[in-house]
Image (tube, rainbow, N blue to C red):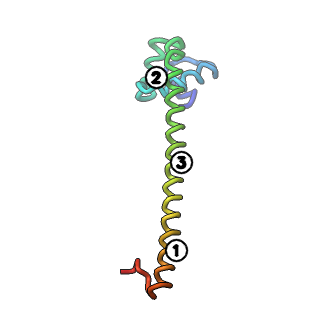
Amino acid sequence: MMLQEFEALIGESIDAEDYRIIQLAYHHPVIKGKEDIARLYKAGGMALMKALAPAGEAQIELHNTTLHLNSIEEEKIRDIKDEFERKRQELSKQYRERFGFDGFQL
């Protein structure tokens, strides 16, 4: 959500630093959308946004960590598949040399 969009929802202007805090609060697990964050801002102002921001920041960090772990997992899966294919080809070659046909082509 852009600053101007948020300001339109709350009907007032805010400065960049407050908006940075509001963006963190927006990621709090209980916030379901733009209207939620605007309603909460109207009800509790920056005090509430500052209270919600640490959990929002933790949620962002958790999300980024999850993405990182998923990429590591995908990389490990690719490595395992590559190693499996190398071993399969090596065993196929050995089998072909020993028995005259590829044992994996049954």
90 in relation to 7, above or below: below
Amino acid identity at mark 2: Ile
Answer left or right for 17 relative to 35.
right
**Secondary structure of the residue carrying numbered label 3:** helix
How would you rate the neighbour count of disc 2 (Cα within 10 Å): few for under 14, some for 14-19, many for 20 or more? many
Amino acid identity at mark 1: Glu
* Pick the front one: 60 or 88: 88
As measured in the structure, the alpha-carbon distance from the residue carrying label 3 to the one carrying label 2 is: 34 Å
Looking at marks 1 and 2 on the same chain, the residue that comes earlier in the sequence is marked by: 2
Instruction: Measuring from the top left, give residue 41's x and y in whole percent.
Output: 48, 17
Q: Residue furthest bottom?
A: 100
Q: Nearer the viewer, mark 3 or mark 2?
A: 3
Looking at marks 3 and 2 on the same chain, the residue that comes earlier in the sequence is marked by: 2
Disc ID at residue 72: 3
25 in relation to 92, above or below: above
55 in relation to 99, above or below: above
Q: Which of marks 3 and 1 is in front?
A: 1
Name the residue tied to disc 1: 90
**Secondary structure of the residue carrying numbered label 1:** helix
Instruction: Measuring from the top left, give residue 49's x and y in whole percent.
Output: 51, 17
Name the residue tied to disc 2: 37
As measured in the structure, the alpha-carbon distance from the residue carrying label 3 to the one carrying label 1 is: 27 Å
Instruction: Measuring from the top left, give residue 58's x and y in whole percent.
Output: 52, 27
* Pick the front one: 63 or 47: 63
